[in-house]
Image: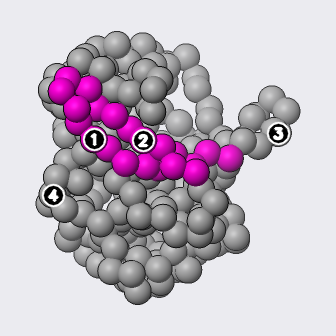
Amino acid sequence: MKELSIIIKTFERPNCLKRLLASIQKVCPEQHIIVIDDSRHPSLTPDELENYQLDIRYIKTTFNIGLSKGRNIGLQTVKTKYFLLLDDDFVLDPFSNIEEALYIIQSENLDILGGKVADINPDNDDIKIRAFMGYLKKVNNKLICTSLTHDSELIECDFVLNFFIGRTSAVKKVLWDEELHILEHLDFFYRAKKEGLSVAYFRKFFTFHQQEHASHYKKFRFNQHKKFSKLLHRKLDVKSILLENKKIYG
């Protein structure tokens, strides 16, 4: 998979990042990895970076530049034709089917190919499968997100989860809005649709997801939802965002 790089944006979750890198060691150790870290202190020491024996470019930025700006820095660093976007609390698995997903995006001439996420409850190890994808349509002052079921193996759509393989040149035309430190998801895919990017969901492509929310992490993420939700609505020029007939936050 020489045509694929991995982008990881990390913030104040060093244990999650190390767990993800350990999973990459087992699943696809040959991939070039770009880590963008805007934590207050570096998440990885030079010794830890060396011990992974992975091809990692570690970029330490100033504190709390935001998810969108960090991803843009990572994307501008990518030299390969495709990239895999990962959150730091994801965990890859030998059955994540990355190689097959890369083949699909190439053979179907797609710009973005998303998959599903298996959320792990750290308290009881319960697993919940999440496959959020569908169509976007603006009607008057509302953005309507029509979600789809995930029975088909490959589904063309307007949006997927933030776990996807992207065509580097196509996504560079869109980028993430750097004013949106969080809640950037729908804005990104709405602009991707306007730009004409082809998006699809591949049912066999997946990652595990196990969150870790320290108090200082919550301070800079969840406590700012209201602020960035208002900004998101203003960016999209809508008063409400609807999932089918239900209002969703952000």
Q: Is residue 143 magenta?
A: yes
**Horizontal and vertical percent position of residue 98:** 55, 73
The span from disc 3 to disc 1 (Cα, nearest Å) is 37 Å
Q: Decide which of tag 2 and tag 4 comes sooner along the chain.
A: 2
Residue on which disc 2 sits: 146
Question: In front: mark 1 or mark 4?
Answer: 1
Q: Which residues are magenta?
A: 129-149
Q: CA distance from mark 1 to mark 4?
A: 14 Å
Q: Which mark's residue is nearer the viewer, 2 or 4?
A: 2
Amino acid type, residue under disc 4 in the picture: Glu
Which numbered dot is residue 195?
A: 4
Q: Name the disc covering residue 125, or none.
A: 3
Mark 1 nearby-residue class (10 Å; few <14, some 14–19, many ≥20): some
CB under 8 Å between callouts 2 and 1? Answer: yes
Kindly identify the amino acid type of the residue bearing the numbered disc 1. Lys
Q: Position of residue 90 (x, y in %)?
A: 58, 50
- Residue 40: x %, y % from top left: 38, 30
Q: Is residue 201 above or below residue 54?
A: above
